[in-house]
């Protein structure tokens, strides 16, 4: 197949790649921009398989990219959705302490939220129960600006805008390798070679492989963490008005099993966090030997496991036994029973882990001469996708970031 040329090539049609495509298009309306996605549709992985929460920005280390982009992303996401008739709800979130031991951690979280400039209100147990009679709480934090949206729908709208404005979206096209040249980047794909002036890689669960294949100097690996959800059935439509989250354990990288309202009505509980046997396989039995070998051969994985053996076993137990999973939910919502849990689609988080076994907490971008690699974009990257895209465009085009 003959080689094709483009000004900008973006690999990955998740929400980050798509937001980047429309951002570059708005800055360079005459440029040729090509987005390459290996799946037959955009948003088949993380962007279409998440909790759907527009995070307010409570949790993130003050001064981090996560804190900055999440706060900007709340407004940007709502504005985008309002402009394009995508429904959102600002239902607010209660982060509930269920015993006295959790109160100091709750207070620390309140301090962090305030340091991030996020509106937050401290409630007594009684005040929390008044707001949410079906919830047990010793105390709670109320984040009124947290909301929900279907990020898959947002991504599909971005794809439609991109093509309507003249962008080339090549679905079913896998980037298999390539090189940086003096003039730009050559990408080998499943449907031919593409020469690009500049390239951006937003490959989610494949981010480490893309970075290594294109010669970026990186020393991390994507470790896939599976998140299983259950849909709640048999419960009234007003079970809870807010999203209900536990107080996060600072020793664990993820936010804990939460009770989430969905845009199409109903509720889910989840997600768990257990090592996935395949990066992009969603059945519980999915196993990809290349993916598993990539995890097990990485010293950082074993160091991470050694440090978190207790929580890893707990998560594994919850993943295997719905009854154990249920216990986490019943701590704050005792009326949900085993009979109320129905299967729901799972997601797999792309989490970068360093060689010394640390979870890389913040968003991570690595530049080469003509490319930018999005190396770590876990939650809240769906909320933050629009400011992330601004940041990528600034770096790629050599504009000083505001
Ligand atoms: C269980 C779970 C819950 C979450 N909850 C939330 C939440 O409530 N709020 C929030 O803000 N964030 C949440 N997140 C995080 C959020 O979903 C992700 O941070 C975000 O979707 C990342 O988008 P992305 O575009 O980087 O990755 P992805 O959506 O994974 O997209 C990457 C794309 O690259 C493509 N690709 C990879 N390799 C190639 C290749 N070689 N050639 C061509 N294409 C390729 C893939 O097919 C894929 O479409 C959650 C994530 C998970 C998994």
Image (cartoon, rainbow, N blue to C red):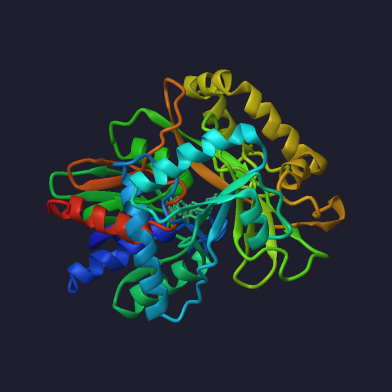
Considering only vertical position in the picture, is 56 above or below 228?
A: below
Considering only vertical position in the picture, is 247 above or below 302?
A: below
Spot occupied by residue 350 in the image (x, y as percentages of width and height): 49, 43
Q: Quadrant of residue 4?
A: bottom left
For the N terminus, the quadrant is bottom left
Compare residues 199 and 374 and report the one nearer the observer: 374
At 33% from the left and 41% from the top, the residue drawn is 62
Q: Is residue 388 left or right of residue 157?
A: left
Spot occupied by residue 321 in the image (x, y as percentages of width and height): 80, 39
Compare residues 181 and 361 and report the one nearer the observer: 361
Spot occupied by residue 89 in the image (x, y as percentages of width and height): 52, 71
Answer yes or no: is residue 370 visible: yes
At 17% from the left and 52% from the top, the residue drawn is 401
For the C terminus, the quadrant is bottom left
Compare residues 73 and 293 and report the one nearer the observer: 73
Residue furthest right in the image: 339
Compare residues 343 and 330 and report the one nearer the observer: 330
At 33% from the left and 53% from the top, the residue drawn is 69
Q: Give the tally of numbered discs.
A: 0
Answer yes or no: is residue 66 visible: no
Spot occupied by residue 322 in the image (x, y as percentages of width and height): 80, 44
Q: Is residue 203 left or right of residue 102?
A: left
Q: Quadrant of residue 70?
A: bottom left
Considering only vertical position in the picture, is 130 above or below 315?
A: below
């Amino acid at each position: 197949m003959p080689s094709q040329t483009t000004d900008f090539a973006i690999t990955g049609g998740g929400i980050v790649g798509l937001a980047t495509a429309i951002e570059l298009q708005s800055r360079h309306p005459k440029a040729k921009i090509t987005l390459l996605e290996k799946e037959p549709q955009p948003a088949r992985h993380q962007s279409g398989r998440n909790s759907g929460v527009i995070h307010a920005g409570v949790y993130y280390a003050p001064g981090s990219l996560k804190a900055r982009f999440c706060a900007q992303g709340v407004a940007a996401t709502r504005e985008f959705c309002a402009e394009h008739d995508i429904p959102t709800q600002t239902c607010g979130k209660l982060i509930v302490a269920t015993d006295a031991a959790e109160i100091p951690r709750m207070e620390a979280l309140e301090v962090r939220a305030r340091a991030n400039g996020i509106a937050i209100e401290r409630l007594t147990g009684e005040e929390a129960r008044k707001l949410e009679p079906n919830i047990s709480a010793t105390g709670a934090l109320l984040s009124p600006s947290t909301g929900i949206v279907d990020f898959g729908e947002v991504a599909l709208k971005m794809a439609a805008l991109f093509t309507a404005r003249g962008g080339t979206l090549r679905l079913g096209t896998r980037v298999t390798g390539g090189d940086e040249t003096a003039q730009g980047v050559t990408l080998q794909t499943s449907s031919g070679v593409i020469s690009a002036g500049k390239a951006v890689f937003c490959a989610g669960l494949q981010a480490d492989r893309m970075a290594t294949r294109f010669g970026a100097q990186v020393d991390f690996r994507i470790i896939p963490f599976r998140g299983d959800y259950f849909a709640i059935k048999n419960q009234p439509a007003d079970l809870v008005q807010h999203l209900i989250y536990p107080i996060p354990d600072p020793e664990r990288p993820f936010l804990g099993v939460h009770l989430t309202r969905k845009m199409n009505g109903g509720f889910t509980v989840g997600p768990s966090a257990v090592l996935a046997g395949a990066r992009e396989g969603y059945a519980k039995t999915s196993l990809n030997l290349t993916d598993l070998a990539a995890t097990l051969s990485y010293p950082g994985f074993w160091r991470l496991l050694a440090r978190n053996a207790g929580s890893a076993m707990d998560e594994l137990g919850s993943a295997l036994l719905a009854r154990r999973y249920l216990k986490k939910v019943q701590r704050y919502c005792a009326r949900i029973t085993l009979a109320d849990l129905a299967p729901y689609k799972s997601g797999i988080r792309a989490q970068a882990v360093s060689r010394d076994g640390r979870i890389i907490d913040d968003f991570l971008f690595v530049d080469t001469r003509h490319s930018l690699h999005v190396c770590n974009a876990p939650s809240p990257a769906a909320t933050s996708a629009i400011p992330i895209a601004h940041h990528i465009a600034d770096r790629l085009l050599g504009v000083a970031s505001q």
